[in-house]
Image (cartoon, rainbow, N blue to C red):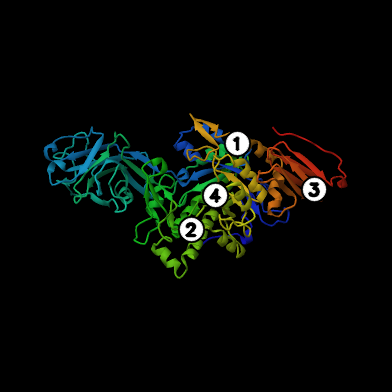
């Protein structure tokens, strides 16, 4: 069951009204207006990839805070930053306390506990038979009956077509420093794993063959909860499948790449320290913050370094027609290793993720009360470039083919089912925000080519009773000035975004292009808001490049953009509330909006405005009120106003922005 607000009205936060919302009434203001603290808000945003500058550049807290300050100094009004589900429900990681392997044949009395690499393998030749033993101690972890647990090992060498089988053993008394094939190694009879207290935890799945140097995971949830919750020690035996007859090398606790690791995941414990840091960084810089929820769908993927393990373990993954999951695997753990796509129609997962979202925004309300009610957080992107039948933009099917999805689809067409699925998924997440004690606007961004754009369906639902998703926009990397201009008032090849009460916003476009200043202006001239991706990161789209830990402007255009942003902020109220002439308005007029000419002429009221800029600047004329007209220009320019005398001009103020 999902709650939707009546006819688009935002649900109230605990102070009686939401912190931010979209005013679609067009009663008080000409255009759809983003409201913050009850006042119109001019959106001019930039994304700060705090996850990537931490993981790739190893930025300190001070360096990350500086990025927020740069965004503020560059004239942006809002920064958007990632908050991963893992950030608020972090898994607990424990490296192996003991590792060794035993080997048959001429090595049967030899101890290998000092080896950095362990062996596990089978051959008809006894010398090539070996078993790996692993032990973990997680006594520091409180509680019991955890929601998910997995074992991860780094295979450093493997021949083709291997399978690894994992056994849990109750015997934790073994001593890696003394055990050999012939002595002290529990629960084996030759290559067979036998005896009391042995639990077969299964083979690596067929879709994840052990055939190269890589991380490999095993679910151990039931074993940990049933056999290890008292002493909080866990022992395992790892062996290759006898049919493959190959040797596999595995890093031990002193391995060159990564020690074996036990991961324990809790669904009832939250840690708000990192979230509080992120809000604090924005507060210190004096810039508003949007949170980008990176969870069960970020770029049509559910990634293991963004989502707690219990989600993968306990809920439905999207399945192909053959019953195997949508699945990719990455070698560099900075990107995450296991990539799935969780099923968007799993009702239990929907409930759990909404619970996490609501808990997060309830905490933000508490943080806000305790830190001066600054209302720093103003928005939430509830899903990042989502899809239904794709995994990281590769088509794996028309949709998920699990039993729940197939039953629900019935006679619907594939597209109808995808549209329904996407709306229910995003609306459910947005409900977690709207029903919290800290309600803000919610949005979804699409990559070009997504299989469920969602705008038409969201607008249909808005008319039929309401939606929790306030607006949806595209990420048109490669967009030029003309497209940025057209997007706000016509349906372009990007899709049907200009319809109903969907506020138009270009949600990501590369910041590493010299056209960025013109694109911001063109979008505003055409009736859309604009968000730059990104400030500084290894993606190659940054306004700034990382040079030895210092953000350096990618080009001279960054200074131009900075000056333009500050110029725009001088008329922020008008940009937030008036319809641009490109979208049919009369009180917010852009001259030479594409920046391609040295002159332009338009009419404001009955005044003929001539604009001449040898450097191809962009002019803005604001009918600011009954007695005031504002003129701005991005470059040196000459304005000529014919017919102004009829208005009885009483004063003229001239200023220059450096």
Q: Position of residue 332 (x, y in %)?
A: 38, 41
At mark 1, the secondary structure is: helix
Instruction: Look at discs 2 and 3 and give the one toward the viewer.
Output: 3
Q: Which residue is mark 4?
A: 476
Tell me how many marks there are.
4
Q: Which mark is residue 56?
A: none
Image quadrant assignment for residue 79 = top right
Say whether disc 2 or disc 4 marks the residue closer to the N-terminus: 2
Quarter of the picture holding the C terminus? top right
SS at badge 2:
loop
Q: Earlier in the sequence, mark 4 or mark 1?
A: 4
* SS for dot 4: loop
Q: Give the residue number, with chain letter if any, for mark 3.
A: 608
Badge 2 is on which residue?
451
Measured Cα–Cα span from mark 4 to mark 1: 20 Å
Packing grade of label 2 (10 A; few <14, some 14-19, many >=20) is many
| Residue 414 image point, x, y percent | 46, 65
Is residue 284 in view?
Answer: no
Cα gap from disc 2 to disc 4, whole angstroms: 15 Å
User: Element under label 3?
Assistant: strand
Q: Give the class, few, some or many, for how many residues have Cα within 10 Å of label 4's Cα (few <14, many ≥20).
A: some
Tell me residue 119's x, y (percent).
Answer: 22, 40
Q: Is residue 345 left or right of residue 519?
A: left
Q: Give the distance between the C-alpha atoms of the residues marked 1 and 3, in whole angstroms.
A: 32 Å
Along the line of sight, the residue nearer the viewer: 364 or 320: 320
Q: Upstream in the sequence, badge 4 or badge 3?
A: 4
Q: CA distance from mark 2 to mark 1?
A: 35 Å
């Amino acid at each position: 069951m999902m709650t939707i607000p009546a006819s688009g009205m935002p649900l109230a936060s605990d102070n009686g009204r939401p912190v931010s919302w979209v005013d679609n009434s067009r009663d008080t203001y000409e255009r759809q207006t983003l409201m913050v603290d009850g006042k119109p808000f001019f959106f001019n945003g930039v994304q700060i990839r705090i996850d990537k500058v931490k993981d790739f550049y190893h930025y300190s807290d001070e360096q990350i805070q500086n990025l927020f300050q740069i965004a503020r100094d560059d004239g942006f009004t809002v920064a958007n930053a990632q908050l991963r589900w893992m950030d608020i429900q972090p898994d607990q990681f424990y490296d192996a306390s003991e590792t060794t392997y035993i080997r048959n044949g001429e090595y049967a009395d030899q101890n290998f506990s000092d080896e950095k690499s362990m062996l596990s393998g089978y051959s008809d030749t006894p010398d090539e038979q070996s078993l790996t033993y692993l032990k973990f101690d997680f006594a520091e972890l409180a509680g019991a009956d955890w929601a998910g647990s997995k074992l991860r090992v780094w295979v450093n060498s493997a021949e083709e077509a291997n399978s690894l089988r994992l056994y849990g053993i109750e015997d934790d008394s073994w001593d890696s420093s003394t055990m050999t094939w012939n002595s002290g190694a529990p629960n084996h009879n030759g290559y067979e794993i036998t005896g009391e207290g042995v639990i077969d935890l299964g083979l690596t799945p067929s879709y994840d063959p052990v055939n190269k140097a890589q991380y490999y995971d095993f679910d151990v949830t039931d074993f940990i909860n049933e056999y290890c919750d008292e002493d909080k020690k866990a022992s395992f035996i790892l062996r290759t499948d006898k049919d493959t007859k190959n040797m596999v090398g595995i890093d031990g606790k002193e391995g060159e790449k990564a020690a074996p690791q036990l991961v324990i995941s809790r669904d009832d414990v939250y840690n708000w320290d990192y979230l509080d840091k992120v809000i604090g960084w924005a507060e210190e810089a004096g810039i508003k913050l949007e949170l980008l929820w990176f969870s069960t769908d970020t770029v049509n993927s559910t990634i293991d370094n963004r989502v707690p393990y219990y989600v993968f373990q306990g809920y439905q993954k999207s399945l192909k027609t053959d019953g195997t999951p949508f699945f990719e695997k990455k070698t560099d753990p900075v990107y995450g290793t296991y990539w799935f796509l969780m099923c968007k129609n799993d009702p239990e997962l929907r409930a759990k993720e909404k619970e996490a979202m609501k808990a997060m925004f309830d905490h933000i309300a508490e943080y806000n009360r305790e830190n001066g009610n600054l209302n720093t957080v103003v928005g939430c992107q509830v899903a990042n470039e989502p899809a239904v039948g794709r995994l990281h933009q590769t088509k794996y099917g028309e949709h998920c083919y699990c039993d729940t999805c197939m039953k629900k689809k019935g006679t619907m067409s594939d597209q109808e089912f995808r549209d329904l699925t996407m709306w229910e998924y995003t609306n459910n997440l947005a409900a977690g925000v709207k029903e919290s004690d800290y309600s803000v606007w919610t949005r979804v961004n699409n990559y070009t080519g997504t299989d469920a754009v969602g705008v038409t369906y969201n607008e249909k639902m808005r008319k039929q009773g309401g939606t929790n998703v306030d607006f949806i926009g595209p990420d048109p990397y490669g967009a030029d000035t003309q497209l940025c201009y057209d997007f706000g008032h016509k349906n372009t090849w990007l899709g049907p975004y200009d319809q109903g009460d969907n506020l138009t916003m270009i949600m990501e476009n590369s910041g590493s292009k010299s056209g960025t200043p013109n694109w911001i202006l063109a979008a505003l001239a055409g009736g859309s808001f604009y968000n730059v991706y990104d400030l500084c990161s290894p993606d190659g789209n940054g306004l700034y490049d990382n040079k030895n830990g210092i953000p350096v402007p990618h080009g001279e255009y960054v200074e131009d953009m900075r000056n333009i942003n500050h110029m725009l902020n001088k008329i922020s109220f008008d940009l937030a509330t008036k319809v641009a002439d490109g979208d049919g308005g009369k009180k917010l007029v852009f001259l030479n909006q594409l920046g391609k000419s040295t002159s332009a002429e338009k009419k404001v009221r009955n005044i003929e405005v001539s604009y001449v800029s040898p450097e191809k600047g962009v002019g803005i004329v604001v009918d600011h009120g009954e007695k005031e007209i504002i003129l701005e220009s991005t470059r040196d320019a000459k304005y000529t106003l014919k017919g102004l005398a009829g208005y009885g001009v009483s004063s003229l103020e001239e200023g220059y922005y450096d």
